[in-house]
């Protein structure tokens, strides 16, 4: 197993080096950590060695670490935000009896006791053995280096850390409502990313992922009765057991030992997460020609049947994503009952475990596993461009869920369109370029990242065709896996695949609140006796689009017309080749009006429809259809 793994990675690295765009660079951070967990106090102590390589052309005088645990303290930015946002996440609140016996809602973070808060304290931080100056600023540790790190140079940081696992509020935490003892996400001092834009030292308020790629070697010492799952591969599996041992191997453990040390390694990831519980059951499923899946869930009779049934479905989902985007590159993936919604991590996901089979498979696993591709492997900046990972994961999630469903939909994204149109009426929409924490409402964030991000790709389907869009995803993954792409990179990839010019689309759709609205203004019969019909169209919204128009005749036949958008300098292939299509003159955006002729009498026309595919995000559908009375 180990040998095969290493070989796989050598191949991978070669391909990614070849695919690397000219001038592109990224930092590297290799972690070695040893941590021991006290399961009485939920405090842990660790040592970290971080080998950090500065591949930039800048000389670094500071580096910054994330101390995510510190968010779970009264008065933290996460606490303040959850108390001041107009539509707070219910998970941040609990109901208590008020002064006059009435029920009031209070912030859970504000009410954490010193034994329940989270913290991460760093001591003894050294750069190549020399002590450095540090300053803790909320969830960030600002490090003034002992010696600047020159371009191309590698340094070794060593430090000790003391942590306390917070009572579970969001993501990381202990003793959550499903009874999982330890969900250890964002638990260690993590180097912030420095890229061509500079440092990304976002405070931990809600959004989190943007990290440095590297290798992890982690040893976790914990009470011997706990079962663990998480990022990486267990190296000492035959000393640990619990279903991790090689088939047929007898695990010999020291009967006098109180603890076990679990040794995990993970290569080319930007995060490391784990979970532990005494009651975890552990099943292993092999995906055909793919990764090994691990399932860790509570030995709770109410959920056992569901957790058995979801295993083949998870394997099926992984195969769909492998085909849709590109092969999952790691040797394993773990689905772990955490205890707080669903959250994606490197090589694993933590999800709630007590829901229905449908809910867990179609909403949690399908989405969180999709993030393996769009976030954990294609590492866009989740704080700056949340729509890239949330939207693209949502897009492939909806395709996969439709594929495994008994009843398939023509447009699997229908509900997303509805939610987007409905939200627009509230007037609370914000541009997708909004930083993830800067949305006024949680709802605006959800619409802006999950839904409008997915609609970015369904618009590509409309603009350049479904096949070109699927090819774009595959090429995007191939060129940007283990990299940090920006919005321009997906646009450029779509342009390279299709030949269309899409600059205008990226700007209009992601940086403005411009909307699409086209309409059929007038349909009139020719007065010269020739059998032809004039159609006047209008562009009402600011965002331009090409036009697919379907004409249905009274004799039951159909014909389609395509009006290319001038600024795209592109002609889309006929999306419905079974229907005869006429390509008309292009439509220059600046002209709000367009006129064309149908070479048949008006009386023979039954119906004219703009965008019969309903893929185009037209905010007013009523004026898209003209029906003869
Ligand atoms: Zn997500």
Image (cartoon, rainbow, N blue to C red):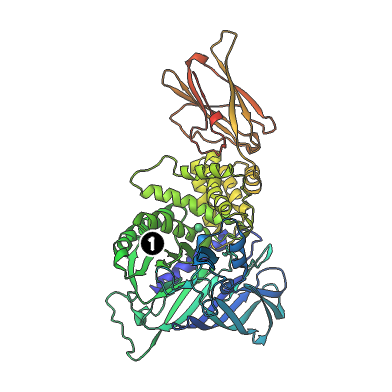
- Compare residues 438 and 459 and report the one nearer the observer: 438
User: Which residue of the protein is positioned furthest toward the bottom in this rendering?
Assistant: 256
Figure quadrant of residue 436: bottom right
Residue identifier under label 1: 290
Instruction: Please state the horizontal and vertical placement of residue 354, each as a whole percent of the image.
Output: 37, 63
Closest to the observer, 441 or 590: 441
Query: Is residue 314 positioned above or below 525 on the image?
Result: below
- Disc 1: CA contacts within 10 A as few (<14), some (14-19) or many (>=20): some
Residue 620, by quadrant, is: top right
Residue 468 visible: no
* Residue 619 placement: quadrant: top right
Q: Is 354 on the left-hand or right-hand side of 46?
A: left
Camera-side residue of 424 and 227: 424
Percent of width and height locating residue 55 = 65, 70
Quadrant where the N terminus is found in the figure: bottom left
Q: Could you say which is closer to the camera, residue 387 or residue 3?
A: 387
**Residue in the image at 46% along x and 33% along y:** 576
Tag 1 secondary structure: loop
């Amino acid at each position: 197993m180990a040998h095969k793994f290493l070989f796989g990675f050598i191949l991978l690295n070669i391909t990614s080096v070849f695919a690397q765009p000219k001038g592109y660079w990224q930092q590297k951070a290799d972690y070695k950590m040893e941590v021991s967990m006290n399961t009485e106090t939920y405090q842990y102590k660790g040592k970290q060695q971080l080998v950090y390589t500065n591949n930039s052309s800048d000389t670094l005088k500071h580096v910054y670490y994330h101390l995510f645990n510190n968010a779970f303290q009264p008065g933290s930015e996460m606490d303040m935000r959850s108390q001041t946002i107009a539509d707070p996440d219910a998970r941040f609140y609990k109901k208590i009896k008020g002064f006059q016996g009435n029920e009031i809602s209070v912030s859970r973070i504000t009410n954490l006791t010193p034994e329940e808060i989270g913290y991460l304290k760093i001591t003894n931080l050294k750069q190549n053995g020399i002590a450095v100056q540090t300053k803790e600023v909320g969830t960030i540790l600002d490090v003034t280096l002992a010696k600047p790190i020159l371009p191309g140079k590698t340094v070794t940081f060593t430090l000790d850390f003391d942590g306390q696992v917070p009572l579970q509020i969001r993501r990381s935490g202990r003793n959550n409502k499903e009874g999982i003892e330890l969900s250890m996400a964002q638990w260690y001092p993590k180097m912030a990313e420095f890229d061509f834009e500079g440092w990304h030292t976002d405070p931990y308020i809600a959004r989190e992922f943007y990290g440095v790629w590297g290798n992890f070697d982690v040893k976790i010492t914990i009470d011997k009765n706990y079962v663990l799952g998480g990022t990486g591969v267990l190296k000492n599996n035959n000393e640990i057991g619990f279903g991790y041992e090689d088939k047929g191997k007898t695990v010999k453990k020291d009967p006098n030992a109180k603890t076990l040390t679990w040794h995990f390694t993970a290569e080319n990831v930007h995060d490391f997460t784990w979970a532990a519980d005494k009651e975890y059951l552990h099943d292993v499923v092999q995906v055909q020609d793919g990764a090994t899946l691990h399932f860790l869930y509570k030995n709770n009779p109410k959920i056992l049947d569901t957790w058995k049934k979801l295993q083949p479905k998870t394997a099926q989902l992984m195969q769909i994503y492998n085909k849709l985007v590109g092969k999952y590159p790691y040797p394993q993936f773990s689905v772990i009952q955490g205890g707080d919604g669903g959250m994606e991590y490197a090589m694993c996901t933590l999800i709630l475990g007590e829901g229905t089979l449908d809910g867990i498979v179609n909403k949690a696993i399908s989405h969180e596993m999709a993030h393996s591709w769009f976030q954990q492997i294609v590492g866009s900046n989740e704080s700056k461009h949340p729509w890239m990972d949330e939207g693209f994961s949502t897009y492939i999630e909806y395709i996969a869920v439709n594929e495994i469903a008994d009843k398939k939909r023509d447009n699997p994204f229908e509900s997303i369109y509805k939610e987007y149109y409905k939200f627009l009426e509230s007037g609370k929409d914000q541009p997708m370029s909004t930083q993830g924490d800067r949305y006024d409402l949680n709802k605006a964030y959800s619409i802006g990242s999950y839904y409008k991000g997915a609609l970015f790709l369904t618009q590509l389907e409309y603009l350049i065709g479904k096949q070109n869009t699927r090819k774009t995803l595959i090429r995007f993954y191939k060129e940007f896996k283990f990299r940090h792409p920006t919005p321009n990179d997906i646009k450029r990839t779509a342009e390279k695949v299709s030949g269309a010019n899409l600059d205008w689309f990226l700007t209009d759709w992601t940086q403005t609140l411009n909307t699409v609205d086209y309409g059929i203004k007038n349909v009139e019969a020719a007065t010269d006796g020739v059998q032809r019909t004039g159609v006047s169209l209008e562009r009402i919204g600011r965002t331009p689009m090409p036009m697919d128009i379907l004409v249905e005749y009274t004799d039951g036949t159909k014909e389609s017309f395509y009006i290319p958008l001038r600024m795209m300098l592109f002609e889309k292939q006929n999306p419905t080749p079974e229907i005869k299509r006429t390509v008309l003159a292009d439509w220059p955006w600046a002209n709000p009006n367009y006129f064309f002729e149908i070479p048949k009498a008006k009386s023979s026309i039954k119906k004219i429809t703009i965008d019969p595919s309903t893929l185009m995000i037209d905010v007013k559908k009523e004026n898209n259809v003209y029906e003869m009375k």
